Image: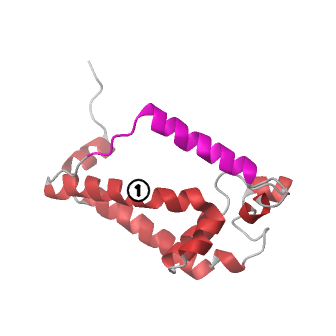
């Protein structure tokens, strides 16, 4: 016999369907506000918060440049955003679509066509991310263009 539901489970069962999408949107708004105020494009490499891998090794991690790419993206400079993290910029339209589809289903009960993600597509994305992470750390031209 399963244990009785706890307080959190009962609270989530009674919460309105629109609460989770609004909470996610609030988190995104808070992140956007922080990035806008902090302006990561003008900070030094050791300014908090920093990437521990880059601080200790000098290498760009797979996510390095994502915050700066987001800053450039919200300011409308897509070439600069892609220079800082091309895969992040590639992924944003898909993430927006997934969020809009989830909101449509949760709040309005309407379904958008589902994105069909096959294991091969996931493998290609992860391989591209790995290749991007390696290439951006090579100290030779033309790979130095990816170094942020």
Whether residue 124 appears in this view of the structure is yes
Q: Position of residue 110 (x, y in %)?
A: 15, 53
Q: How many marks?
A: 1
Q: Position of residue 73 (x, y in %)?
A: 52, 73
Give the residues drawn in magenta, as a range. 114-135
Does 133 lie within the magenta span? Answer: yes
Does 77 lie within the magenta span? Answer: no
- Relative to 41, 114 lies left or right: left
Q: Nearer the viewer, residue 56 or 116?
A: 116
Q: Residue at x 85, y 57 (%)?
A: 139
Q: Residue at x 62, y 78 (%)?
A: 38
Q: Position of residue 26 (x, y in %)?
A: 38, 68
**Which quarter of the picture shows residue 117?**
top left
Q: Residue at x 62, y 70 (%)?
A: 68
Q: Position of residue 22 (x, y in %)?
A: 30, 64
Taking the view exactly as shown, the residue that stands out farthest to the front is 142
Would you say the magenta stretch is mainly helix, strand or loop?
helix
- Relative to 80, 135 lies left or right: right
**Which quarter of the picture shows residue 119?**
top left
Q: Nearer the viewer, residue 13 or 126?
A: 126
Whether residue 16 appears in this view of the structure is no
Image vertical order of residue 104 relative to residue 116, above or below: below
Image vertical order of residue 62 relative to residue 80, above or below: above
- Relative to 109, 55 lies left or right: right
Q: Residue at x 85, y 53 (%)?
A: 57
Q: Nearer the viewer, residue 78 or 48?
A: 78
Image vertical order of residue 39 relative to residue 134, above or below: below
Which quadrant is the N terminus positioned in? Answer: top left
Label 1 belongs to which residue?
95
């Amino acid at each position: 016999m399963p244990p009785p539901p706890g307080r959190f489970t009962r609270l989530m069962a009674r919460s309105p369907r629109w609460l989770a999408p609004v909470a996610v949107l609030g988190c995104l708004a808070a992140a956007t506000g922080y990035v806008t105020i902090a302006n990561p494009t003008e900070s030094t490499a050791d300014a908090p918060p920093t990437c521990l891998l880059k601080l200790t090794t000098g290498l760009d991690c797979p996510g390095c440049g994502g915050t700066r790419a987001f800053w450039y993206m919200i300011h409308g400079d897509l070439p600069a955003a892609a220079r800082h993290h091309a895969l992040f910029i590639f992924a944003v339209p898909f993430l927006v679509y997934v969020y809009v589809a989830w909101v449509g289903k949760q709040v309005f009960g309407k379904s958008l066509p589902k994105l069909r993600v096959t294991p091969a597509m996931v493998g290609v994305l992860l391989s591209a991310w790995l290749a991007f992470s390696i290439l951006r750390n090579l100290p030779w031209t033309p790979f130095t263009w990816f170094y942020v």
